[in-house]
Image (cartoon, rainbow, N blue to C red):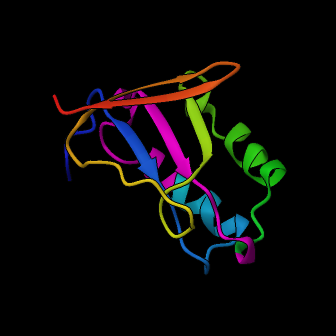
């Protein structure tokens, strides 16, 4: 298990995911050792067949008390959808989840 201290998690899922499954998967991530040191979460856009709407995703996130203090950005174009952005693994990232979401990645 990688060290989660000061990390930003980039989470995505495939077309077989449905709201209850993503809810369980997200809760499993929250239970990981060191999750309390995570600094933010970026969630990839879901495929239409998954039927995870913006409202469903917002409700899932609201039920996770440990996410209340974290910036969470969702519906980002990476993972199993097109178009997609490729993020480098191991780079340094910052996110802002205010009125306008912003993700910045540098090499170090």
Q: Quadrant of the C terminus?
A: top left
Total labels: the figure holds: 0
* Magenta highlight on residue 29: yes
In terms of depth relative to the viewer, which is nearer, 96 or 36? 96
Quadrant in which residue 37 is drawn: top left
Residue 42 relative to residue 92: left or right: right
Percent x, y for residue 95?
Answer: 46, 26
Residue 14 relative to residue 62: left or right: left
Quadrant in which residue 6 is drawn: top left
Residue 83 relative to residue 36: left or right: right
* Magenta highlight on residue 88: no
> Residue reaching furthest left?
108
Residue at 78% across, 70% down: 51
In terms of depth relative to the viewer, which is nearer, 59 or 91? 91
Percent x, y for residue 106?
Answer: 26, 30
Say above or below: 14 vs 43.
below
Percent x, y for residue 44?
Answer: 55, 54
Residue at 33% across, 32% down: 105
In terms of depth relative to the viewer, which is nearer, 18 or 104? 104
Percent x, y for residue 99?
Answer: 71, 19
> Residue reaching furthest front?
83
Residue at 62% across, 44% down: 74
Quadrant in which residue 69 is drawn: top right
**Which span is picked out in magenta?**
27-49
> Residue reaching furthest right?
55
Residue at 73% across, 78% down: 49
């Amino acid at each position: 298990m990688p060290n989660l201290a000061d990390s930003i998690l980039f989470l995505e899922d495939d077309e077989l995911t449905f709201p209850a499954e993503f809810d369980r998967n997200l809760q499993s991530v929250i239970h990981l050792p060191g999750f309390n040191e995570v600094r933010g979460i970026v969630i990839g856009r879901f495929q239409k067949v998954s039927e995870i709407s913006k409202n469903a995703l917002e409700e899932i996130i609201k039920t996770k008390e440990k996410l209340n203090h974290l910036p969470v950005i969702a519906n980002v174009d990476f993972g199993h959808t097109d178009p997609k952005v490729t993020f480098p693994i191991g780079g340094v990232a910052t996110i802002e989840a205010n009125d306008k979401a912003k993700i910045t990645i540098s090499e170090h």
